[in-house]
Amino acid sequence: MKINFKSVLLILLLILAAYPRAHVFCQSLSSSELIGNAKEHDGKSVTFTGEAIGDIMLRGEFAWVNINDGDNALGIWMSAALAKEINFTGSYKARGDKVEVTGIFHRACSEHGGDLDIHAQSLRKLGDGRIVNQRLNLDKKNLSISLFGALILIWILSLFRHR
Amino acid sequence: MILKPRLEDLKIIGFYLGKIILGLAFTMAVPILAGLCFRELNPALDFLISIEISVFLGLLLLKICHTEKDLNWMQGMIVVSLSWVVAMFLGAIPLYLSGHWKTFLDACFDAMSGFATTGLVLVQDLDHMSYTHNLWRHLIMFLGGQGIVVIALSFFVRGFSGAFKMYVGEARDEKILPNVVHTSRFIWLVSFVYLVLGTIALGITGIFNGIKPLNSFFHGACIFMAAFDTGGFSPQSQSILYYHSMAYEVITVIIMVLGALNFKLHYHLWMGNRKEIFRNIETSTLFITIIVAFSIVAVGLAQMGSYPSAVALFRKGFYQLVSGHTGTGFQTIYPQQFLADWNHLALAGVILAMALGGAVCSTTGAIKMLRIGVIFKAFKEDLKRIIMPERALVIEKFHHIKEVFLEDKLVRSALIITLAYIILYGLGALVGMFYGHPFLNALFESTSAAANVGLSCGITNAAMPAALKVTYIIQMWTGRLEFMSVFTILGFLIAALKGK
C-alpha cells in the first residue's frame, strides 16, 4: 500500500491545530527556571502555572497577583479584569485557584522599579480553590489536657510540701 | 588553678534560668489569644502545649534550685547564654507542631534566627501559615531584639544587683537610665510607641496597595516588628517583594534605620536633644559607611548592567544594602538573583555592610558603628602622632552622648570584638566552603548569619546539611550575644571538666 504523505501531513496538522495551543508551543516554566535563568527568558513570552496566594492587590485598572508554584512565588501584573477570574487565594484557611498565566517575563522590570515579574496577557484557571476546614487535632488536644493535669499535680504537691 | 563549679553555682544559675523561662512562657499567651481571635484552634493548641511545657520546666527549676542568693558576673553571663539556647528549644516547639518545618532542627534554626533577629529561614509553605504562628515568628524577633533578659528584667525580676550582670551579658553595656530595670522598661516604651506608629503607617499603606484591612494591619504589625528589631522575617515567602510597593519599601527603610540606632540616642531625641543625631559618632559613622558601601554596590551593579535604569538600580541596590547594613534582611530580590544579577564587587559591598552593622545598644548585630568609629579615630590619632612634632600632645576625642576621650582601653576592646567577629565570619565561610560552596557565597551567608542579618544568596534552605544548620545557629547565637557570655559558658564547661 502506498502511503500518501500529503494526506498524513494534513492529518497531523489538523491534530496539532485541534490541540490546545499552550500545550504545543508554551510549555509552563517553573519559578526556579525563570529566576535561575532570568536573562535567557527576559522579554520573552512565558507560561507560568501555580496557586494564587495572599491578596489580590488592585492598582487602578491593574492588579498584582502573586502566584506560587511550590518553590517560589512570582509577582504577576495583570489587568483587573483578568484578576477578577480568581476566586480563591491561598492562605491558612484556603487553597487558592490554580492558574496558568501567559505573559511577558521581565528579569528587572523597568516599569516596576527593577522587580522580577510577569506581565500577564492571558490567564486560564486550571483548578478551583476551596476553603479548608480545619478539624480539631485530637492528639494535640489530649496532649495539652495531659500536660495541664501534670501541672496541676505539681501545684498540689508543692502545696503539701509547704504544709 | 581552675576551680570546679560548686553545686551552689548550678542552683543559682538554674533558679534565674527558671525565672526567664517563666517569662518566655508568659509571652506565648499572646499567640494563644490571637489564635482564639482568628479562630485558629489547632495553632492555639500548639501554643498551649508549648506554654505548659515551658511552665513545667520553669517551675521545676525554681523548685529544685530555689535560692535567695544574688548572681555574680560568671553566673549572670551563663544565665544569659543558656537563656537564649533554652528559648530556642522552647520557641521551636510551637513552630515544629505547626507542620511547616521538616525537622525539629529546622524549627530550632528558625527560632534562633527569630530570637537573634537574624531572619534566615527554613520554613516550608509559608504562604499557608496561620496568623497565630506568623505572629509568634515576628513576636520572637520583637522579644529577641529587645533582649530575652530585658523582658525578664522589665516584668519579672525586681531590683537585685545581678540584674545589671545579665543586662550586660546580653550585649547591652550602656545604661540609658541609672537603674537597669528602668532602662529595660524605657527600651520597651520606645519599642511600643514605634510599634503603634509603624503598624498604622504600614497598615494604611497596605490598604492603599490593595490589601484587605485586617490583613493589612496584621502584615503591618509583623513587618514593623521585623524591621524595627532588624530581624527580617515576613509573613509571605517573597519578603518585601510580595507588596510590589515603593511606599512600603520607603517606610521599611525608615523603620530599619530607626531600629539600627542606639536606644540611648532615641532617649536623647525624645528628650528634645535633636542635635545629638548629627554629633553622635555612631550616626555619622553609619551615614559614611552607608555611602561608601552603596557606592561599591552601585559601581558593581552598573558594571554588570543588572538594572534597566538608574532608578531601578538605586531602588534595588540601596534597599538590599540598607537591609544588610542595619542587619534586617528584608529582600526585594530573590536570593538566587544575588548570584545571577550581582557581580562580585556588588556582593562585596553588601558583605561589608552586613559585617559592620548598626549602633551599639540597638537591635542590630555585627561589629557595630561605635567600634568602627573608635578604630577610625585611633588610626587618625596614630597618624597625627607620626605627622606632628614629637613633643606635641595628641589627644583624640569623640562625641557619643557626651565628649569621650579616646583611651587605649576603649580601642583595645573595640579591636578585640572586631577581630572576634571577623574570625566568626571566616569560620562560618570555611564550613560553607567545606560543603562545596564558592568562597564569596559562603562568606556572604556566614556573615549574614553571624552578623544577624538574614540576607541569603540561596545557601540557606531546608536541604542544606545539618552540620551547616548547626554552624549557622551557633554563629547567630554567638554574634547576638557578642561573645563574652558564650566564652563564659565555654570556660564554665572547661572548669567543670578540668577544675579541682
Image (tube, helix red, strand yellow):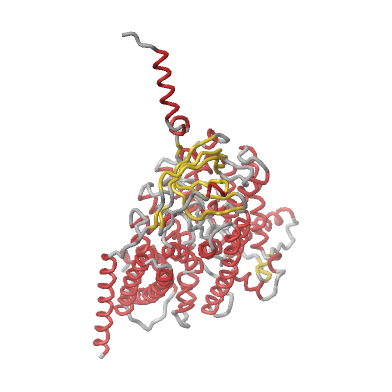
Looking at the rendered structure, the number of numbered marks drawn on it comes to: 0
Residue B45 falls in image quadrant: bottom left
Write the residue at 25% across / 86% down.
A161
Write the residue at 31% across / 69% down.
B500
The quadrant of the image that shows the N terminus of chain B is bottom left
Task: Find the residue positioned furthest to the top.
Answer: A2
Task: Find the residue positioned furthest to the bottom.
Answer: A163
Indicate left or right for B188 with B500 as reference: right
**Nearer to me, B306 or B135:** B135
Indicate left or right for B91 with B413 as reference: left
Write the residue at 32% across / 74% down.
B6
Residue A16 falls in image quadrant: top left
**Nearer to me, B464 or A65:** A65
Indicate the position of residue B177 as horizontal and vertical percent values: 58, 78
Write the residue at 30% across / 80% down.
B63
Indicate the position of residue A126 as horizontal and vertical percent values: 42, 43
Indicate the position of residue A110 as horizontal and vertical percent values: 63, 42
Residue B1 visible in image: no
Indicate the position of residue B324 as horizontal and vertical percent values: 56, 53
Indicate left or right for B284 with B66 as reference: right
**Nearer to me, B98 or A56:** A56
**Nearer to me, A77 or B421:** A77
Give the vertical position of A149 relative to A45 (above or below).
below
Give the vertical position of A80 relative to B491 (above or below).
above
Residue B454 visible in image: yes
